[in-house]
Structure formats: structure tokens, C-alpha cells
Amino acid sequence: MTLAAGFDLGGTQLKFGLVDEAGRILVKDKVDTPKGIEDLVALFGRVYRELKAKSPAPVAAVGFGIPGTYDLRRRRILQSPNYPSLDGYDLDPALRREIDVPFRVDNDANMAAYGEWVAGAGRGVGSLVLLTIGTGIGGGIILDGRLWQGQCGYGGEVGHIVVHPDGERCACGLQGCLETEASAPAIVASTGPSPPARRRESRPRMSIAGPRAARRTPAGLSPKPDSISASVWASSSTSSTRPRFSSAGGS
């Protein structure tokens, strides 16, 4: 029997473990993620040696799931919004000094999607999409039985699709990425007992005019209609009780 070691690097924690050939987890643990890149590489080496010492069988290979845009051609992280020390860092040579068996580095969500397809919830399916939600949001895609990474390796980076152009600035440099709206910190901030005022003010809201709708208006939303909802209800009141949406323009 041979085993493999796995590392899942997050913005706040490094998770790691040992798995057998059937995908069963034999050892797992986690530690806080250091901020400096040299400290991180040293931590990878120290944990790997500890795993080898605990392992009941030889460790034949290691996988590293790293958050960020991983370039398959250059084999390096181009940008890691939640771990900026990795930006442009040539990780492979540094890991070779610490790891004495074959290893693979890839985007963490790609690794997670492949793992679920091989040994988890995706066993037996031809295609799947996996989303990781933590400090950031990642995505991995299995398409027709293969890990789909796109031409450069970051085809599943859904966390940095802009979903709210007037939203908050993302650590990647864009504004209103999915990650700023639905990552774990964003969800906690928006659903906590006292969400920051800047988040409430940055989001456009639509409310429906009328006494019946006013009773359904959630707390914290203005009952005053905006221009879109007002025009919809003005047009619907003359023809039907159900609002109808039509596209603007000459057609």
C-alpha cells in the first residue's frame, strides 16, 4: 500500500492529510497560514516530514491545492488575491527543496473538483461543477470526464466574475466580483447583527410600490420605489394586475 499527502492552502488555514489509493482519509489536520512566502514553504516541508513520520506506509506523491490563478504553461501562481505573497512566485523549485517525492501544484478548486469526481460526491458522473466558499470563492469543472481548465489553466475562476459593477473593490483589483458578494467573510458581514453601512449603501435595491407590497418590504429596505419599479407598476396598472417587464428601445 502506498499513500499520498495533500495540502489545501487557504487565506487563513493550511489543511493537510494522508489518503490511500481508494481515497480514504487516514490523517488530517490544519494549522494557521503564515503570511510570508518563505515561512509558508518551510511550513510545507515541516508538515510533509511530520506526515511521513506518522504514515503507516510510504508516501508516494504530494498534491498542493493553491488559491489563485495558476498558469499551466509557466507553472506558477499569477495572482492569489487572498495570499498575495504567492503572486508571481516560482513555487515549484522552492518545493523541490522540501519534498523528496513527485508532487503536483494546481488551483485549489481544481484539485477539489477532481477529488470529488474521483472519490467523493461526483463519482460516476460525466460532468460537474464544484464551488469552494471560504476566504474567497473558487470553482472547478469536470467536463466529459476531464478536468476542464481552459487554455491557460484558470477556466474555472468564477470567484472573479463581476456580478455587481458598483460593489466593493476585490482583492484582485476588480470591483464587484462574486467573491466580494458571497465569500464567507462577505456573507458574515452582510448577515451579522450590524452589517457595515458601506455594504448596505453600495447595493442597488428595488422595492415595489403599493400598500400590499409595502407590507412585504423587508426591514432595512426603503419602501420608496426606484425609477425601474415605478415605471413597471405604472404601465401594469393600466392593463393588468401582474407587472410586465419589457426591454427599452424603439422595438
Image (cartoon, rainbow, N blue to C red):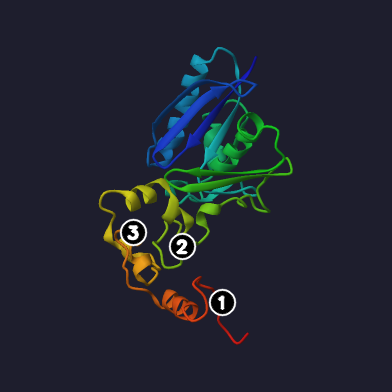
Mark earlier in primary sequence (1, 3): 3
Q: Report whether 21 appears left or right of 83.
A: right
Question: Looking at the picture, which amino acid does disc 3 mark?
Answer: Pro
Whole-number angstrom distance, CA of label 1 to CA of label 3: 26 Å
Disc 1 to disc 2: CB gap under 8 Å: no
Q: Which mark is residue 218?
A: 3
Q: At numbered mark 1, what does the secondary structure look like: helix, strand or loop? A: loop
Q: Which residue is situated farthest in the top direction here? A: 56
- Give the CA distance from mark 1 to mark 2: 31 Å
Depth check, front residue: 35 or 240: 240
Residue 241 shown left or right of residue 116 in the figure:
left
Q: Position of residue 238 (x, y in %)?
A: 49, 81
> Label 2: which residue?
174
Which badge, 1 or 2, is on the more N-terminal residue? 2
> To which residue does mark 1 refer?
246
Residue sitting nearer the eye, 56 or 121: 121
Percent x, y of residue 207: 38, 68
Q: Residue at x 57, y 37 (%)?
A: 112
Mark 3–mark 2 CB contact (< 8 Å):
no
Q: Amino acid at mark 2?
A: Leu
- In the image, residue 201 lies at what x, y percent? 32, 65
> Could you classify mark 1 by the number of other residues whose Cα lies within 10 Å: few (under 14), some (14-19), or many (20 or more)?
few
Mark 2 neighbour class, 10 Å CA radius: few under 14, some 14 to 19, many 20 or more: some
Question: Which amino acid, mark 1?
Answer: Ser
Q: Is residue 199 above or below residue 94?
A: below
| Circle on res. 196 | none
Of residue 36 and residue 181, the one placed in the foreground of this image is 181
Decide which of tag 3 and tag 2 comes sooner along the chain.
Answer: 2
In the picture, measured across the screen, residue 162 lies left or right of residue 225, that is right
For label 2, the SS is loop
